[in-house]
Amino acid sequence: MRKLFAAIVLAALAIGAIGAPVLAEDNPSPAEHKRLFREGAKLWPVYCNTCHNARPGSEKAPYEWDQIMMHMRTIANLPPDDAKAILEYLKAR
């Protein structure tokens, strides 16, 4: 039973370690935030609008957007920089 619990904990930590660093940046500077927002606004219709209607960013909490983006990045095969820009755009709307 202990081995099973340890394996589950290790798997959860590994999954978190793989996805989190790609999308999380501590605190971008205001200029970087503005650049990412503009880039995300351009990329959202390219990647997201094909399947999703526009929704206000305030519909979800920032941590929820982090989780959604990790999931959608995998499904849509988004490059890391594009995913970061779209995430910044979604959180700021």
Image (spheres, rainbow, N blue to C red):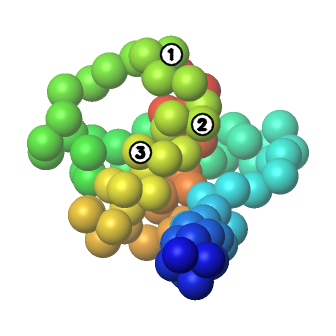
| Residue bearing the label numbered 3 | 68
Q: Badge 3 local density, few (<14 within 10 Å), some, or many (20+)?
A: few
Q: Amino acid at mark 2?
A: Tyr
Above or below: residue 89 compared with residue 25: above
Please report whichever mark, 3 or 1, sits nearer to the chain's N-terminal start.
1
Task: For marks 2 and 1, give the one nearer the viewer.
Answer: 2
Question: Residue 28, image x and y in percent?
Answer: 81, 48
- Quarter location, residue 30: top right
Q: Residue at x 72, y 42 (%)?
A: 33
- Marks 2 and 3, the one that precedes in the sequence: 2
Given residues 31 and 51, the one toward you in this image is 51
Q: Residue at x 50, y 38 (%)?
A: 65
Numbered label attached to residue 63: 2
- Measured as percent of width and height from the top left, residue 68 is found at 41, 45
Question: What amino acid type is highlighted by mark number 1?
Answer: Ser
Name the residue nearer the viewer: 65 or 54.
Answer: 65
Is 81 positioned to the left or the right of 33 in the image?
left
Q: Determine which of the numbered discs, if any, sits on residue 5 in the image.
A: none
Near mark 2 (Cα within 10 A), the count class, few <14, some 14-19 or many ≥20, is few
**Image point (25%, 63%), residue name:** 75
Task: Classify residue 49 by image quadrant.
Answer: top left
- Residue 43 location in percent, x, y? 38, 50
The answer to whether any part of residue 44 appears in the image is yes
Q: Is residue 26 left or right of residue 56?
A: right
The answer for how far apart the CA atoms under marks 2 and 1 are is 12 Å
Q: Tag 2's secondary structure?
A: helix
Q: Which residue is mark 1?
A: 58
Q: Residue at x 33, y 67 (%)?
A: 74
Q: Nearer the viewer, residue 81 or 1?
A: 1
Reading the chain from its start, which is encountered first: label 2 or label 1?
A: 1
